[in-house]
Amino acid sequence: MIRSGDAPLFDLDAYLAHIGLPGPRTPDADTLRALNRAHLYTVPFENLDPIRGIAPSLAVEDLVAKLIHGGRGGYCYEHNTLFATALEALGFRVTRLAARVLVGAGGAIRPRTHMCLLVDVPGEDDRFLADVGFGAAGSLIEAVPLVADTEFRAGTRRHRLVHAPHDGPLEMWVLQAYESAEDGGAGTWADQYAFTIEPFEAPDYEVINWHIATNPRSPFSRTLYVQRVTDDTHLSLANRRLTETRADGTRTERDVTDEELPAVLTATFGITPPEGLPPLAGS
C-alpha cells in the first residue's frame, strides 16, 4: 500500500483485484497492455457527478473509494489519475499528458482537456501511449508504442499514431482509430485526439477538471455520458440515447426514460447509481 504520512492512499492489491488482474507484477510491455485492457473493460466511463453539479475529486484516496469500492466509474482525469498511480506502484515511469479531442470537432480548435499517459517501460526502446479514460468508441484497448505510421490491433480495434503539422517546438501526435463502414466497404482512419509529450502536473488537471465539470458551456456539465467496452461492442448512453456499436460498425439504438435510468446504469454499465440524478434532457 502506498502511503503519504500516516494516511493510506492507494491499495495496489485492491485495485488489481477489482480489475480482475491480480498478476503479473512485472513492469513490462505485456503487463502494461493487460492492465490497460483490464481497467477499460472493468471500470465504466461516466460523468454522473458533473451533471449533478459536483466537480469530481482527483485525490487518490477519493478515486479509490469511488472507482474501486464505490461501484462507480468516472471520466478521463479520474480514470487516468488512478491508472497512473497503479502503474507507478508497479514500477513504471509515467508522464501525464493533455490532448485536444478531435472527435466531432469539425476542424475547430479545442482546448487540451483530455488526460492521457506516456509510459516508460523497462527494457523497451519506445515509450507507450496508455489511456483508460477516453469515452469514445475509438478508445485504446491496449497501450501502444509511441511510433508513427504503424498499425496496432487489440481485440476488434485498430489504431495508429501519425504526426500532424504543428508550429510548436514539440512534435504533434494524433491518435487515429479505424472505423469500419456499415455497408461492409472500405473503412476510414478517424482522428481521436492530438497531443505533444509536454508533461502536465496534478494542479493542471485540477484546473481543467473544474472547468469541464462546472462550466455551464461544457457538455460534461449538462449532458449525461456513460460508456462501457466489451470484447466486441461499445455501449454508450448519451443523454437518453442508448447505443450498442459492434465491431463491424453496425449499431442498435433506443431511448431510455428517467424511470429506466437507474436500472440501465446498473444492468448495462455496472454502475451503482448515486442519489440525486437529474431528469435527462428532453424529459
Image (tube, rainbow, N blue to C red):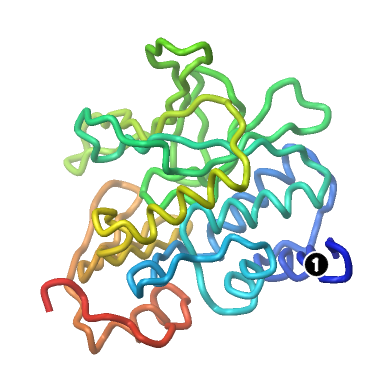
Q: Is residue 162 above or below residue 272?
A: above
Type of amino acid under label 1: Asp
Q: In this view, does 14 lie above or below 257?
A: above
Q: Which residue lies furthest to the right in this view?
A: 6
Q: Closer to the camera, 77 or 163? A: 77
Image quarter for residue 260?
bottom left
Q: Residue at x 23, y 57 (%)?
A: 251
Mark 1 lies on residue = 13
Image quarter for residue 130?
top right
208 relative position to 53: left or right: right
Image quarter for residue 42?
bottom right
Residue 13 in percent (x, y) is at: 80, 67
Quarter that holds the C terminus = bottom left
Q: Residue furthest left?
A: 282
Q: Which residue is drawn at 55% across and 65% down?
A: 57
Q: Closer to the camera, 268 or 87? A: 87
Quarter that holds the N terminus = bottom right
Residue 127 in percent (x, y) is at: 67, 27
143 relative position to 260: left or right: right
Q: At numbered mark 1, what does the secondary structure look like: helix, strand or loop? A: helix
Q: Which residue is drawn at 58% across and 79% down?
A: 70
Q: Which residue is drawn at 55% across and 44% down?
A: 131
Q: In this view, does 209 lie above or below 19?
A: above
Q: Closer to the camera, 99 or 16? A: 99
Residue 10 in percent (x, y) is at: 76, 64
